[in-house]
Image (cartoon, helix red, strand yellow):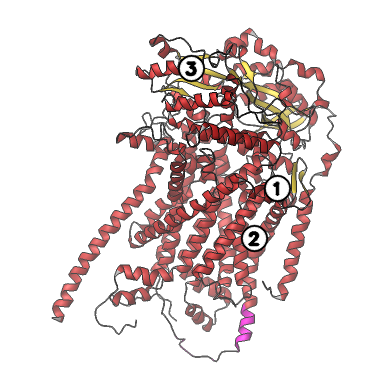
Amino acid sequence: MADTAITARPASAARRRRKRNTGTNVAALLIAAFVALPLYWMVAASFKGQADITSASAIPPHPTTANYTNAFSSYAFGTYIENSAIVAVATTLLVLALGIFAGYALARLPMRGKTAIMTALLMISLFPTIAVVAPLYLLLRDIGWLNSYQGLVLSYTALMLPFAIWILRNFFLTIPKAMEESARVDGAGPFRTVLQVILPQALPGVFTAGVFTFVAAWTEFIISLTVNNSDRYRTIGVGIALFGGQFTTPYGTIFAASAVAMLPIAILVLVFRRAVVSGLTAGAVKG
Amino acid sequence: MRFPRHRTPALAAICAAAIALSAAGCSSSASTQAGPVATGAAAGTITWMANQFGPTSTDVRKTLIAAFEKAYPGITVKLEQAPSDEDTYRSELVTQISGGSSSFDVYNGDVVWPAQFAKADLALPLNSYFPSSYWDKFSKGMVPSLTYDGQIYAAPLFTDNAFLFYRKDLLAKAHLPVPTTWEQLQSEAETLQKDGLVKYGFAAQFNSYEGLTCDWTEFLADAGGSSVNAAGTRSTIDSTAAVKALDYMRGLITSGVAPAAITTFEEQQSESLFDSGQVAFLRNWTYAYADANTPANSKIVGDVGVTNLPTFAGQTGPGYSVTGGWNLYINPHSKNLPADVDFIKWMTGAQAQTIMAEQGGVLPTVASVLNNPRVQASNPAFPVAAKNKLNARPSFVAKYPQLSEAIYTNINGALSGSVSTSSALSSASSQISAALSSNGL
Amino acid sequence: MTSTDTRGGPPQTGRRPEASRPARRRPRPPRSVIQRGSARLGWAFASPALLVVAAVMIFPIVFSVVMSLSNVNVTGNGFQLSGLTTHNYSILFGSPRYWHDLEFTATYTVVTVTIEMMLGTLVALVLERLTRARGWMMALLLMPWALITVVSAELWAYIYNGVYGMLEAGLNTVGVHGVDVLGTPLQASIAMGVADVWKTTPFVAIMVLAGLVMLPADVVEAARIDGASAWTIFWRVRLPLLRPVLAVAVMFRILQAFGIFDLPYVLTGGGPGTSTETLAVLGYKVLFNDLEFGPGAAVAASTALIVLVVCLLFLKVFRTQVAEQEG
């Protein structure tokens, strides 16, 4: 009896696994379709000329790359991309560097006033940006950091740190305390504990915080519009807002520019996904 | 919350810094308090902030700058692109100017901004920099709309009128004349639709935004009414004329002459639809003629006629057209006033105005240029404009944005059918009253 | 939980030992010394980040709150603040438009956040099960999130256009004509919600996925060995462990949804009428169209206060480890 039980189970388990896999794959396909359909529409529109933009056809009737060339020739779009890249990368690095340590401290170290700090961070991040933008302009003007990289990076870092700290702290909370205990017992200093013990375990959380910060910096609009208004330092979001005139919204050019702007993020995710994947199959850390 | 003792000095420092900075921010740039003076030779570099106008294929601003620099070799003009959305542009201007920025010297501004900008000290009063005879050359009605409290705050750069654009070919096919009343327009449109010649009869800008205030002002004036009284102290929008206008506009939608989506249309959408050949009649601005005749954009090249807007039956003359357009303002923090003044003088001079009319396709503000036969011949809309009956939006009120918002949000609500005509008008009226007495949001 | 079980289940991979004992016992110094040292260390770790946030954000926020309590005049020489008054707030609270916008924003937040949390968790579960395609799916999922909000709103405006939009074209193929989604209040709200869900579900999904991936594997394994069904495992084992992650996701989604600006501004302008106007759109209009910085700041401050209260209540209700970690 026991033997048949053992042999019978693997077969049904395999069948169940296969059904689960089909279910998963179908669900994945549906999700992908829902996500991809508007994106496809956007890319298709980017290849439609001005006359076809009102033709609701799935395939552009007369495909043209005019929108793409227009984005880069009539506007300094290349410069905007470069500026966005510099600002976003710098912001992400700064936010992660500061946020990881702050998040760890607020998760694990016995500080007084942790609730207060987390609440204060929450309060700061929930103040509407539109009300903050005018005084922020005054502040940066007084420091002399208008129309620069550092002004924007500083603003974004301050804006995005609360969220990053919250995420990182909560992810650190899910790591068992025993981890740090064993590291401390082994004589590792606090710095090394964080970098070499905690961080690898929390890689998915760090990746999440990093991606969100990068995307937020990449797509931010209202602060960049106010603070960096010279063409030399403009970012992508603001650049796109300049397209067209009073009565024209050049959908084709806007979508073309946006499609190009999305690519770096796609590439980044694909490059860094290995970090996440390896994070989850990392071997056990021996105690 | 309790902080460990050794943390408080640092926090105190931060708070002190914050307060110090806020004090500094509150009283910024004391240098302009004495008042700028335009002395010295006009030379150097100035920055002109402007959004794009005219046809999208050529940038007439660059043509103008090149011609100006040739006439004034000592002055260089840098062009700074403004956001294309007007409200975004205004928010940027407000933040920059109130923050003391002098990164631009001269900027384009909408015709409805003078009162609001004047009240908030965001534009330089120009009376002391131009002789009073300077202002005489502009077409009638231009300068009063730029005046607030006795001072002139901007120079008229170009103006804009609204027209009725129609499909010559469709009217010819159906043997119909060009309509002169709104009622006639509706019946002709219905005929064209019934005969299967066109999908929609009429398109305009009925979205919940400033453009609806323009269209509404026209319909309302055609019906004999107004949104506020002449002194700008009282709301007059709740009237029989307003009911007539609103009922007509709503009727266009319910009868199928206008697409239901017209309540989401701005200039862009109405224009695209017309250019794709699906609409018989379009109410739009001057630029629409050039766009409709550009092969890259339009499927109806050569089939477009332009005429004055119709009015309601029983009224005389053509229908009213609202005045649009853009003006040149000076940033109060500009550091090169002599050059700014020369720039403005040249841009409102005959050469620049002719370039704008002929190459930019916009209506010049200088009367002599507008009446020039060569200019008149360059654009079929110009002779029509000369016969236009003009009406301005009530922008002489400093609270114009609130007023306009009271109008367009409520009218849009009625047009989309979510509220009745009468409740929309009474709601608009009370909101306008609140705005005029500075009591509302 | 230990590997003495020979029934043939999957081998014990245990990324992290559940409750490990140190290999060697050491005499521990008195707790208070470690506590103090660690507390100082904690402040050393946290202060750079906190200083940056405070230095940049405190002035603008304080300034805004002060503006909301003063009479503000915008002038070419800066903001002239005078007097201390609650007039701005009384204008707000006496305005039916404010209350309507608040109600709409609150309803919108509750509905969209609920949907996004459920959908996002579902997507995360699917993503977790994918092996080879996971990276590509994540890249695809991040695309809506990576679109600039203004462009995303323009895209959806283009899709929803009543005459040449994708939606209209699709409905035409099944014989439905003339649906004007953005021109009717309820439908416009739903349309906005769909656009919002499309754009931000990936945010929740990625966060939950990261949380799932970081769960201790042995606890889940143990439950599976005990014969629990996948559903029970999810509900009873994994979901509770995900609480901290879910809490952050919900809180920040509430924050973002309550302050949503770009989408309604570009998609509907707050229309038809003011039916889809959110508090942020109202604040923007009052600040930058009407140039009323006093009431505008009051809108912003009241929004922030409401969200704060909601978030604090939420934290209390879900009893996340905030209090438990107090030192």
Rate crowding at label 1 as few (under 14), some (14 to 19) or many (20 or more) other CA atoms within 10 Å.
many
Q: Is residue B80 above or below residue B58?
A: below
B103 falls in the magenta region? no
The answer to which image quadrant residue B167 occupies is: top left
Parent chain of label 3: B
- Label placed on residue B183: 3
User: Image check: C148 left or right of B278?
Assistant: right
Residue at the spot of label 2 = C53
Magenta stretch contains residue C32: yes
Label 3 Cα crowd, 10 Å radius (few <14 / some 14-19 / many 20+)? some
Whether residue B221 appears in this view of the structure is yes
- Disc 2 residue type? Val
Residues drawn in magenta: C21-38
For the C terminus of chain C, which image quadrant? bottom right
Q: What secondary structure is found at the residue carrying circle 2? A: helix
Q: Along the polypeptide, which appears first: circle 2 or circle 1?
A: 2
User: x, y (%) of residue C18?
Assistant: 41, 80
Residue B370 appears at what percent x and percent y? 65, 13
The residue positioned 38% from the left and 46% from the top of the image is: A36
* Residue that mark 1 sits on: C294
